[in-house]
Image (spheres, grey):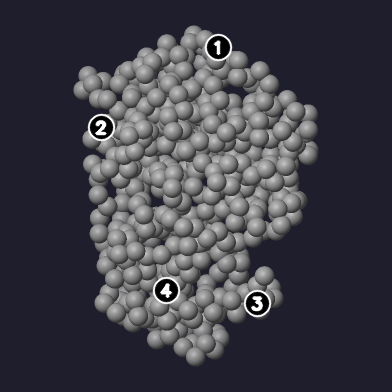
Amino acid sequence: MAERAARRCCLGWDFSTQQVKVVAVDAELSVFYEDSVHFDRDLVEFGTQGGVHVHKDGLTVTSPVLMWVQALDIILEKMKASGFDFSQVLALSGAGQQHGSVYWKTGAAQVLTRLSPDLPLREQLQACFSISDCPVWMDSSTSAQCRQLEAAVGGARALSRLTGSRAYERFTGNQIAKIYQQNPEAYSHTERISLVSSFAASLFLGSYSPVDYSDGSGMNLLQIQDKVWSQACLGACAPRLEEKLGRPVPSCSVVGAISSYFVQRYGFSPGCKVVAFTGDNPASLAGMRLEEGDIAVSLGTSDTLFLWLQEPTPALEGHIFCNPVDPQHYMALLCFKNGSLMREKIRDESASGSWSEFSKALQSTEMGNGGNLGFYFDVMEITPEIIGRHRFSAENHEVSAFPRDVEIRALIEGQFLAKKIHAEALGYRVMPKTKILATGGASHNRDILQVLADVFGAPVYVIDTTNSACVGSAYRAFHGLAAGTDVPFAEIVKLAPNPRLVATPTPGASQVYEALLQRYAMLEQRILSQTRGPPE
C-alpha cells in the first residue's frame, strides 16, 4: 500500500450506461488502480435494468440522476477504504455516456458550493434536480422534436452542416425540446442543463462545469465550425436555453480546482485540477491514442468507426464531433448495425459454424472475389438505410446465391467497402501514416483483419481497449495539465503501450479495391433507389 501511496497520478472516470468506473494512471502511464460500481447490482434500490428505466411506451428511456450521485459516493468510499492516497492526484477528468442530460433546479448552485464534508453527496443533493429521471442515449421518443428542429434550420442536410449531424432522437437538443413542451414547469425551474459528462465534472468542481466542445457536438445545438451555440437551433428547442447551457469550452480546458468537499472528506490536494469531462466516444478516441489520419474500427455487435478528420464534410449519415484532443481538428463516428451477428450468421450458414472454416474461405478466395459483391443487412442498417441481402455478379446482375467461400468473402469485403465509402463521404482520406486500430470480437481473427488492411490500404494494429474511455480520461487529465504550453496530445501519451501490428496491405490490393469501391457505391445507390426512390 505504501508503494501505491507514493505514486503521483491522474484519475480517469467513466459515467457510463451501466456503471461508474475509475482508473488511476501514474506518470509512466501505467494503470495501477481501478474500481467500479455497477448500477443494477450495487444500487438495486433504483430498480434499473442495464442501468436504465425503459418506460411503457418502449421509446422513453431514462436513468435516475441520484443513482449516478450515489455511485460516486460509493466508489470514493471504496477507494478510501483501500488506502488510496488521494493527495497524490494531480488532476482528474472523465467521460459520460453521450447525449444524456441533467436538469439542475434553481438554487442547486448554492448547494454545490456549500457541501458539508461530513455527509455523502446523495444526502445533500437530493432536492437539487428538477427532473429526477434523466433522458439518456437509448431514448427514441423525440421524433416530433427532431422534425421541428430540422424544419427550423432548412432541413436535415442544413442541420448536419451546422451541427455535424442531422436530427437524432437521442441528441440532447431534441430531448430538451420535449421536456420544455411536455413539462414546462420543470423546465422553468431549471437553472442549468448539463450533459452527463459536465454534470459529473460539476460534482468534483462544486460548481457548474461548462460543456466541452466534443461532447457538446452530440446535441444538435453546437455549430461545430465556430464552436458556439447555434441561435437558430436554441430557439427551435426551448426559450432561455443559452443561459441554461452556459458557454462551451475546449475539451482540454482546466475548468477549475477540485471542490473543498473532496479535499476535506477524502484528502485530495487543494491543487488538484479538474479537466473538462467529455463524452465516452471522444474519451475512447483519446484512450486509443488516435492521431491525424488514423481510424479505429470496433468490430462488435454493431460495428463502429472512429475517424480523425482535418476537414470534415458532414453528411446525412454519421456524426462529426469536435476532436477531444486537438481543438483545430474533428472526429467522426459511423455506426453499422449489421456487425458481429451478421458475421456469425454467415459463419453458421456457410462455414458449419466454424471460425476456422470461415478463415479458410477467406484464405482460399482471391482479393476482389472475382468481381462478386454482396450486401448483407438482416436488420435495417443505419449506414445506409437498407434491409435484406443483395448479391451481384461481376457484370452487376443481381443473383440469388453465391458458393459458400464466395459468400464469406463477399460479406467481409462488403462490410469493409461500405465502411470506407461512408468514411470518405465524411471527408476521411487514408494518409501515408494512417494506422487502423481494430478492437472488438472480430479483431481476434487475423484473416478478417487482412481484408480490412487490403480494402483500406493501411496497416492494421490491435490494442487493448479495456476501459478505453476511463484510461483516455486519465490521459486527457495529463494533457489538460500541460495544455497551457501547447504540448500535443501525442507527446503526452508517447510512453503508453504501443499497439501491435497484425496485418499489412497485400501488394496490388489498392488497384483491386479502387475499382470495387466505385462499383459498390453505385450498387448501393441502386438498391436504395429501388427501396425508397431516388436520393435527395
- Residue type, label 3: Ser
Q: CA distance from mark 2 to mark 4?
A: 42 Å
Residue at 56% x, 25% y: name it.
208
Q: CA distance from mark 3 to mark 2?
A: 55 Å
Residues 290 and 357: in front is: 290
Q: Earlier in the sequence, mark 3 or mark 1?
A: 1
Which of pointers 2 and 4 indicates the residue nearer the eye? 2
Q: CA distance from mark 2 to mark 1?
A: 33 Å
Q: Are marks 4 and 3 in contact (CB under 8 Å)?
A: no
Mark 3 residue element: helix
Q: CA distance from mark 1 to mark 4?
A: 59 Å
Q: Is residue 113 visible?
A: yes
Mark 4 residue element: helix
Q: Are marks 2 and 1 in contact (CB under 8 Å)?
A: no
Quarter assignment of residue 515: bottom left
Dot 3 corresponds to which residue?
A: 529
Badge 2: few (under 14), some or many (20 or more) residues near its Cα, within 10 Å? Answer: some
Dot 4 corresponds to which residue?
A: 413
Q: Is residue 445 left or right of residue 199?
A: left
Residue at 34% x, 38% y: name it.
486
Q: Are marks 1 and 4 in contact (CB under 8 Å)?
A: no
Mark 2 residue element: loop
Residues 174 and 79: in front is: 174
Q: Position of residue 264 (x, y in %)?
A: 42, 11
Residue at 68% x, 46% y: name it.
233
Would you place residue 205 above or below residue 41 in this image? Answer: above
- Residue type, label 2: Ala
Label disc, if present, on residue 27 of the rendered structure: 2
Q: Position of residue 103 (x, y in %)?
A: 65, 30
Q: Is residue 110 left or right of residue 116?
A: right
Q: Earlier in the sequence, mark 2 or mark 1?
A: 2
